Structures are given as structure tokens and as C-alpha cells.
Amino acid sequence: MKKVGLLGGTFDPPHIGHLMIAEEAYTQLGLDEIWFIPSYEPPHKAKTTTTVTQRINMLEVAIADNDHFLLHTIEVDRLGKSYTFDTIMLLNEKHPDITFYFIIGADMVEYLPKWYRIDELIGLIQFVGVKRPDYVLKTDYPVIGLDIPIMDISSTMIRKRIKKEQSIKYLVTPSVLRVIKEFHLYESN
């Protein structure tokens, strides 16, 4: 059976931390592919600062040079709140021959009890928690812990740096940097 890792998020913007987490999960778990799933309307976050089209554009160029990274717009196509439960139900229905691994940060592992329909969701998918030094990966749910090199980069930090006119070189791929500069993204947010 094919094994696919799912990495969801707003990707506002996608950065090298996202890519490294995906590559580490791919390698350590022996996955066949990683699917990046940009959310349309994340249930636990404020609205994004760029349009969904801009976020998809940045994600496309960010993963373009990795043949086992794929973009999947299931949540954008569905519109509305991007609940993981709904996404997994659709993916399992469309791909019964695939075992999915849902990759989340350690901070989200702590938040799992509050996830929409978590008791049903936990039976539908294997969660993978990316360990972080400031979080203990402690949960009653079956979560595979993933050790990765420590890289303290976030989309929020990148947006703040752009607003302050600080460099984001090496925090995002050169292709994402080109898109951000071309469309003057995050400069006035």
C-alpha cells in the first residue's frame, strides 16, 4: 500500500522549515510522497494576509524541484472552514489504496483534544508529531514522534521581517522570494 504524508497549513508564505519537515518525514517514515495541502480557511488561525491564489502560487514554486512533493488543493476546492476531518474523509474515499500520515507540529499535538471530531479522526489517520525543543510531545493519542534538525522559522516571523524591510534570503526558496518581491507581498500587512 502506498504511504503518503500530508502537510497542511496556510503556507503564508511557505518557507524552508516546511520543506525540511516534509523531507525529514519522507525519509524517516519511508513515505512514497508528501502532499502539501494549503488550507482555504484554517479553523484555528486568523485569516491569511495573502489570497489563496498567491499562497498556491508560492507553494507551487517552493516544491517544484522535488519530485516527491505534490500540491493538493482539496481544501481550497472545497471552500469554507478547512477541517482536517472533512479532508481526511474525502481523501480516504478517493484513495482507499493509500495510508495517510498527517504531519503536525508539537504545538498542535497538545491542541489535538480540541480538534474537530478528533475521536473519529484519530481512527482514520496516523498522526506524526514533529518534535520541538520547547514542547513535550505528550498525548493520549497515538502519535508518531519525529526528530528533525531544529530550525526556528515561521511564516509569521517572515512576514514581520518583510514589513521591517529585513532580509528573508535563505528563509524561503529563491523562487518564493521572487514571487514575494514581484507582487510586493506582506509589505503593507
Image (spheres, rainbow, N blue to C red):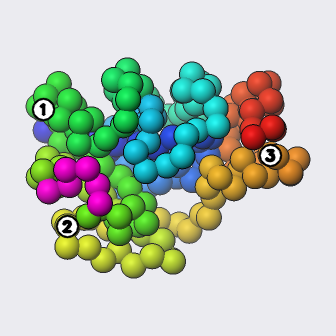
Give amino acid for label 1.
Answer: Asp
Residues at discs 3 and 1 in contact (Cβ within 8 Å): no
Cα separation, mark 1 vs mark 2, equals 24 Å
Image quadrant where one finds the C terminus:
top right
The residue range painted magenta reads 114-119
Pointer 2 local density, CA inside 10 Å: few below 14, some 14–19, many at least 20: some
Instruction: Name the element at disc 3.
Output: helix
Q: Residue at x 71, y 50 (%)?
A: 158
In reply to whether residue 105 is colored magenta, the answer given is no
Cα separation, mark 3 vs mark 1, equals 43 Å
Residue 141 numbered tag: 2
Relative height, residue 159 to residue 113 (above, below)? above
**Front: mark 3 or 1:** 3
Give amino acid for label 3.
Answer: Ile
Relative to the observer, which residue lies in front, 50 or 136? 50
Residue corresponding to mark 1: 97
Image coords of residue 142 (percent x, y): 19, 65
Mark sitting earlier along the chain (3/1): 1
Quarter of the view holding residue 186? top right
Residue corresponding to mark 3: 162
Mark sitting earlier along the chain (2/3): 2
Image quadrant where one finds the N terminus:
top left
Cα separation, mark 2 vs mark 3, equals 38 Å
Instruction: Name the element at disc 2.
Output: loop
Q: Residue at x 44, y 31 (%)?
A: 40
Would you say 180 lies left or right of 14 here?
A: right
Relative to the observer, which residue lies in front, 70 or 38? 38
Instruction: Name the element at disc 1.
Output: loop
Relative to the observer, which residue lies in front, 148 or 112? 112
Pointer 3 local density, CA inside 10 Å: few below 14, some 14–19, many at least 20: some
